[in-house]
Image (tube, rainbow, N blue to C red):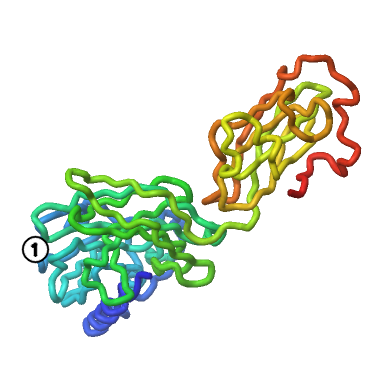
Amino acid sequence: MIRGSVSRQARTVAAVLATGGLLAACAKMGAPPGGEIDDDPPRVVLESVSPGPGAAGVAADSAFVVAFSERVDRRSVLRSLRIFPPVDFRDVDWRGDTLSLVPAGGWSADRPTLIRIEGSARDSHGLAMGESFQTVFTRRAHPDSGVVTGRAWAGKELDASKRFLVFAWTTQDSAPEGERWPVAIAETKSGEDFRLSGLALERTWTVTGVIDSDGSLRGTGRGGAEVDAPDTVTFPDDVREVRIADFLVGTLDSLGTIQGEVAVDSARTAWVVATPFASADSASADWLARTERRTGPLAGGPFSLSVPTGVDYRVGAFVDVDGDSSWRAEEPSVPLESPVSLRFRSVAEGLRFDLVGLAPWPVDSSATSAPADSAATNEEKAP
């Protein structure tokens, strides 16, 4: 977990503000009487940020300067400030909407400095930024160029009130035991590609996924989760970008859903079947006869099949010509070529099986009716 990232600097900031008598001036101001309602959130003016994103050769005692697009609640900005590795400040200065921070002991010399202003920072009317801002700079002559990409999947803990983050950190930093100081942070969505850049090529990196429930950049709090990717990352010679395997943050529901649509000739019925991929490795469709999960009989239209999560499935559909609910080699089938994965998610949707015209022989009335022991239509049979 990311620990101790701001507590020391927050105390220093509070002391400086109190000494300068600025806390009173930072008090939240109410909206002026009359006039239009301010519904534009504050934002960081990118042109004002110094050192700029990706800057190299930064002097140890350079001020970090950032301006906002409008008057902000200064205390909310300072509370939303995250700096890795943490530093103390000898000067905290507000001039209008511009904040200047001067480190007491200088910025880190052996790694980049990552600064974030979280989206919880507010304007003087209480409207939050919403989107976080971050920048990275280094005292080295050249910025680090390593990149890690991949996909992280979020479990059922993630909802609209929480953020999904991935970050890269290294044990070769001087972070105290049990603490993690990220060098790169990316906000992402479940199952979408992320990109972490600015990593030193000579170091070994761990990628961590976080479901952030309380804005702390940690997986603590109710509904939070935090997981390291299975493998650490090293950069081989002449390689600047490494892609890691997908990984899951949090937990999945015990049962997932495979859903889609089936098209079948009138007076025909079909079944959709799913079998764990490891037990369905036959190159032919023989696995359709050994399936453990199925739904039908279907006269066409949508289907939904409940299966355990954490597994890859072979999925296919067949025309039930003889009405016995079981596949035989003479019955037309359409298996999917690629497995359907529920290892990292609880729902696989959008599947479509077109069985129209695949059973041209004459229809036998006894062959198109549901079997006598079929208790219900369009329901999954227990394995």
Residue positioned 18% across, 64% down in the render = 64
Inspect this view and state whether residue 69 appears: no
Residue 313 in the image: above or below residue 43: above
Residue 353 point in image, percent of width and height = 66, 29
Residue positioned 36% across, 76% down in the render = 27
Q: SS of the residue at dot 1?
A: loop
The answer to which of 291 and 113 lies nearer the viewer is 291
Q: Which residue has dot 1 on it?
A: 59
In the figure, residue 92 lies in which quadrant? bottom left
Q: How many marks?
A: 1
The answer to which of 236 and 92 lies nearer the viewer is 236
The answer to which of 374 and 197 lies nearer the viewer is 374
Residue 266 point in image, percent of width and height = 81, 22
Q: Is 114 on the left-hand or right-hand side of 326?
A: left
In the figure, residue 334 lies in which quadrant? top right
The kind of residue on which mark 1 rests is: Ala
Q: Is 305 on the left-hand or right-hand side of 325?
A: left
Residue 292 in the image: above or below residue 173: above
Residue 142 point in image, percent of width and height = 11, 52
In the figure, residue 9 lies in which quadrant? bottom left
Q: Look at the image and tell me in which quarter the N terminus lies.
A: bottom left
Residue positioned 26% across, 51% down in the render = 197
How many neighbours does mark 1 have within 10 angstroms: few (below 14), some (14-19), or many (20 or more)? some
Inspect this view and state whether residue 123 appears: yes
Residue 124 point in image, percent of width and height = 38, 66
Q: Residue furthest top?
A: 361
